[in-house]
């Protein structure tokens, strides 16, 4: 019986433990090789699907999206670009030639029996390279007709001045100013509508058109201005792809170098960085598997998963390094087992809280943000599982580091005195130890300072704004912003909105001119507003209507009536009137100038309310709606901000419950959430105070911020609870926990923050701002966890923070034991 007990008390075979972890490492390497295949190939496929269209992000259930879908279904003019250059004046040869070169790429016109073909087009009047260029574009798009139409402002002017409209040229030009013709009455542009096949290849098609025009007029391509929704999307697509391909490799290299400096272990560094890099590829592949295209929101997904993986890996590695440093006689296998016993529980808890923060993003109704939350949560779980599988083997291959720990022992001072004093480094270390202990012995000034900062910055939360303004996604000197500025200066505003006037179906007894008069009044009212720079509608293309009873006047009115009634008339072909079984819709296309300092939502509301007020006494019942790109983008901003708050509240509530369960205390869970709330309140409050709007790069970061901040909190609470379970006082337990976890938390902040800062050099503002925001978030979270949380532990509130699930007294590490250890004590460590 005594022999049996003696055998049970023997320490585990350290060699067998090391061999077991090495076998797991080999299995993990094989698994990583297998996962690398989809991570490489399907991540590349995901990048190739990158396609940004904010109108697709808004859910179809919203009234604004229903109106927008209804508009695009009946008018089909949502995908327009406008191209202009210095010589694109009315009647200029270059404008006509550009239109003619694009003609074979356009779909057959409604009133034309045969489409324009390469054979029917007179290429002898055009540059000799134009036919080959058309063939290349057709091959690129996989479609002979990637364009609906391509017409210059001169063609529109000709249609207005010709029969049946016969509008005087001066009047026609005045009607088109601010829309297709500049204030000088000469500068105009080329209007191009893209089909679905053209939109899918817009990244290549639109630059090709731009280069074609530049070649035609002998100007550099960057002197050809292009504006419009498809072009905005193409630029965002291209910059998103460039950001991923350009900055992901240096980010990984920076992380690897910093990891190696911090851990001083090639096996640990290689394991962590490899898993993080493959994790990046896997989340991109996961997006590809969902069938949803990549977009500007999802490009911050890979670096975020990379950061979370690095963070967990550094924490686990530091448990091993601390143990080997504190217990010189322990074997590598036993140290690895002890590190996993002490570190896996808090890492799993930390990952769980991060997953909750990420999954809360699925409450946001913007589709890319929902995908972001779901895919990112799956990604961090997979990478943590890989770390747990592989890191113990890497630990066994890592040479133990001696004398690394900042030990907290009752014998420390006596040892120094016994040695006759300390050297300069020991004196400096002693100074900081004493300084930290003094701060911990007086916790309330620190707590008060943090609460005061949080209260002050929280005033900015009510001033938060969101923005998905595409030009603002780029630097002021960028090509896209230069083009928009040139276009607005020479031709007119570029923000488009669509006023829809909805009437009852046009009956036989109804006078179409009555409806025309209502539309005319609405257009005059809108164009008088300072917000509106120009408008285009059916009114623009009909001649002045005489009111007399003369035969000539009667004939003129009848001609206009016929143009309105006839669904095949030239007026109807312009796309400003649409009929359904239960209504008739008239469209007024308005243009508004881009202004980053003015809320477009207020401008939209002003235009709609003013027109509604002007038509309140209309003799014909009419319903006024404002839709189009301006309305749907504004709605996306509102949904982003509103759902961001809902997402954060849900994440805060769920993580609070997790913390309560972890600490076995409702009060303790709420107290522990204070340091986790501080980074979010501080950063978002500061953004509100300085009026820096949330964009697609930072909008999901509130919930993510909460999840990341909890990571360090869980590790610190776990070690604090472990030391309290061994009988240490609050101050000494807090100091010991901070001594052990502090270096890992600092390393995580430095490695992850500086690795993400590689993206700061991107010209794509959302990505650049995301990297800066995440660095600030990590740094602020570090301040909260290293100052506020230990202060809370040492105050009277600390008694509710000492009973964490992760505090396993048997999972001892150096900060949980005195320096002097007996061999039997050390052997119990795993």
Image (cartoon, helix red, strand yellow):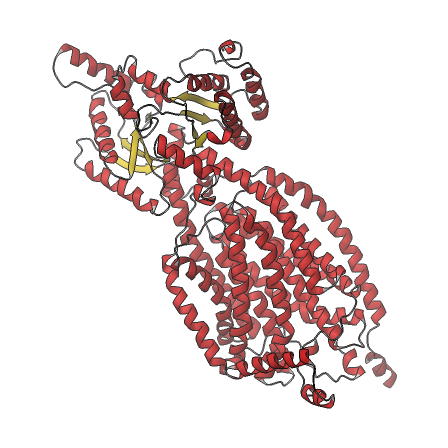
Report if residue 312 is visible in the image: yes
- The location of residue 620, given as percent across then percent down, is 20, 31
Quadrant in which the C terminus appears: bottom right
Depicted 85 relative to depicted 701: above or below:
above
Q: How many marks?
A: 0
Quadrant in which the N terminus appears: bottom right
Classify residue 66 as left or right of residue 414. Answer: left
Q: Residue 435: which quarter of the image?
A: bottom right
Classify residue 468 as left or right of residue 611. Answer: right
Q: Residue 66: which quarter of the image?
A: top left
Q: Residue 260: which quarter of the image?
A: bottom right
Classify residue 706 as left or right of residue 563. Answer: right
Please state which of residues 805 and 93 is positioned toward the viewer in this rendering.
93
- The location of residue 674, given as percent across then percent down, is 48, 70
- The location of residue 584, given as percent across then percent down, is 29, 28
Depicted 687 relative to depicted 412: above or below:
above
The residue most toward the left is 549
Please state which of residues 23 and 317 is positioned toward the viewer in this rendering.
317
Depicted 461 relative to depicted 735: above or below:
above
Give me the residue at 76% from left, 83% from top: 821
- The location of residue 734, given as percent across then percent down, is 58, 79
Report if residue 69 is visible in the image: no
Give me the residue at 52% from left, 15% from top: 127
Please state which of residues 421 and 567 is positioned toward the viewer in this rendering.
421
The residue most toward the front is 424
Depicted 534 relative to depicted 455: above or below:
above
């Amino acid at each position: 019986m005594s022999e049996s007990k003696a055998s049970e008390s023997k320490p585990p075979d350290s060699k067998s433990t090391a061999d077991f972890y090495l076998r797991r490492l080999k299995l993990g390497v094989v698994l990583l090789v297998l996962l690398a295949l989809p991570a490489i190939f399907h991540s590349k496929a995901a990048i190739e699907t990158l396609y940004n269209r904010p109108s697709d992000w808004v859910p179809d259930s919203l009234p604004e999206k229903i109106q927008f879908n209804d508009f695009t279904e009946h008018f089909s003019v949502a995908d327009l670009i406008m191209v202009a250059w210095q010589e694109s004046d009315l009647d200029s040869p270059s404008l006509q030639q550009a239109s003619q070169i694009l003609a074979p790429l356009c779909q057959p016109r409604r009133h034309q029996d045969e489409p324009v073909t390469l054979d029917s087009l007179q290429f002898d009047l055009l540059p000799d390279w134009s036919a080959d260029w058309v063939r290349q574009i057709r091959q690129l798009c996989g479609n002979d007709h990637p364009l609906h139409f391509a017409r210059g402002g001169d063609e529109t002017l000709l249609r207005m001045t010709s029969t049946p409209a016969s509008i005087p040229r001066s009047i026609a030009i005045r009607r088109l100013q601010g829309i297709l013709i500049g204030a000088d009455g000469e500068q105009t542009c080329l209007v191009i509508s893209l089909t679905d096949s053209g939109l899918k290849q817009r990244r290549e098609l639109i630059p090709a058109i731009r280069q074609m025009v530049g070649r035609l007029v002998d100007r550099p391509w960057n002197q050809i201005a292009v504006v419009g929704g498809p072009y905005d999307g193409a630029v965002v697509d291209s910059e998103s792809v460039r950001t991923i391909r350009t900055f992901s490799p240096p980010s990984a290299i920076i992380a690897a170098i910093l990891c190696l400096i911090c851990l001083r272990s090639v096996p640990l560094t290689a394991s962590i960085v490899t898993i993080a890099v493959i994790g990046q590829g896997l989340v991109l592949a996961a997006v590809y598997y969902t069938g949803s295209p990549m977009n500007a929101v999802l490009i911050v997904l890979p670096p975020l998963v990379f950061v979370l993986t690095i963070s967990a890996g550094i924490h686990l590695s530091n448990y091993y390094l601390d143990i080997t440093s504190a217990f010189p006689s322990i074997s590598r296998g036993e140290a690895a087992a002890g590190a996993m016993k002490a570190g896996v529980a808090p890492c799993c808890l930390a990952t769980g809280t991060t997953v909750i923060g990420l999954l809360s993003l699925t409450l946001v109704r913007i589709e890319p943000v929902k995908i972001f939350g779901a895919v990112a949560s799956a990604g961090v779980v997979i990478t943590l599982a890989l770390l747990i599988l592989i890191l113990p083997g890497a630990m066994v291959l890592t040479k133990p580091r001696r004398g690394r720990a900042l030990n907290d022992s009752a014998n420390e001072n006596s040892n120094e005195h016994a040695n006759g004093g300390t050297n300069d480094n020991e004196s400096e270390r002693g100074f900081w130890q004493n300084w930290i202990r003094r701060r911990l012995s007086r916790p309330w000034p620190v707590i008060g300072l943090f609460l005061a900062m949080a209260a002050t910055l929280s005033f900015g939360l009510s001033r938060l704004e969101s923005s998905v303004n595409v030009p603002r996604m780029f630097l002021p000197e960028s090509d896209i912003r230069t083009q928009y500025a040139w276009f607005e200066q020479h031709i007119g505003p570029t923000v488009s909105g669509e006023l829809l006037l909805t009437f009852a179906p046009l009956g036989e007894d109804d006078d179409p001119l009555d409806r025309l008069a209502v539309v005319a009044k609405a257009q005059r009212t809108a164009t008088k507003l300072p917000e509106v720079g120009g408008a285009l509608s059916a009114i623009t293309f009909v001649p002045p209507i005489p009111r007399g009873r003369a035969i000539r006047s009667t004939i003129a009115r009848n001609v206009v009536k016929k143009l309105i009634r006839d669904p095949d008339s030239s007026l109807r072909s312009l796309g400003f009137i649409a009929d359904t079984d239960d209504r008739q819709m008239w469209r007024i296309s308005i243009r508004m100038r881009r202004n980053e300092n003015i809320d477009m939502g207020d401008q939209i509301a002003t235009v709609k309310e003013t027109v509604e007020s002007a038509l309140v006494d209309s003799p014909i019942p009419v319903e006024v709606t404002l839709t189009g790109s301006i309305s749907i983008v504004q709605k996306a901003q509102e949904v982003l901000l509103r759902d961001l708050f809902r997402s954060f509240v849900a994440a805060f509530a769920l993580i609070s419950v997790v913390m309560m369960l972890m600490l076995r205390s409702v009060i303790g869970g709420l107290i522990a959430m204070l340091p986790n709330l501080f980074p979010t309140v501080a950063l978002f409050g500061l953004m509100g105070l300085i009026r820096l709007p949330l964009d697609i790069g930072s909008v999901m970061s509130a919930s993510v911020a909460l999840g990341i901040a909890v990571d360090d909190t869980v590790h610190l609470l776990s070690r604090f609870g472990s030391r309290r379970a061994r009988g240490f006082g609050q101050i000494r337990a807090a100091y010991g926990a901070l001594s052990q976890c502090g270096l890992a938390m600092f390393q995580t902040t430095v490695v992850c923050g500086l690795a993400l800062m590689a993206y700061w050099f991107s010209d794509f503002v959302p990505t650049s701002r995301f990297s800066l925001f995440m660095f600030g978030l990590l740094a602020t979270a570090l301040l909260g966890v290293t100052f506020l949380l230990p202060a809370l532990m040492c105050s009277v509130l600390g008694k509710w923070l000492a009973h964490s699930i992760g505090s396993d007294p048997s999972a001892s590490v150096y900060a949980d034991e005195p320096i002097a250890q007996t061999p039997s004590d050390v052997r119990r460590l795993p």
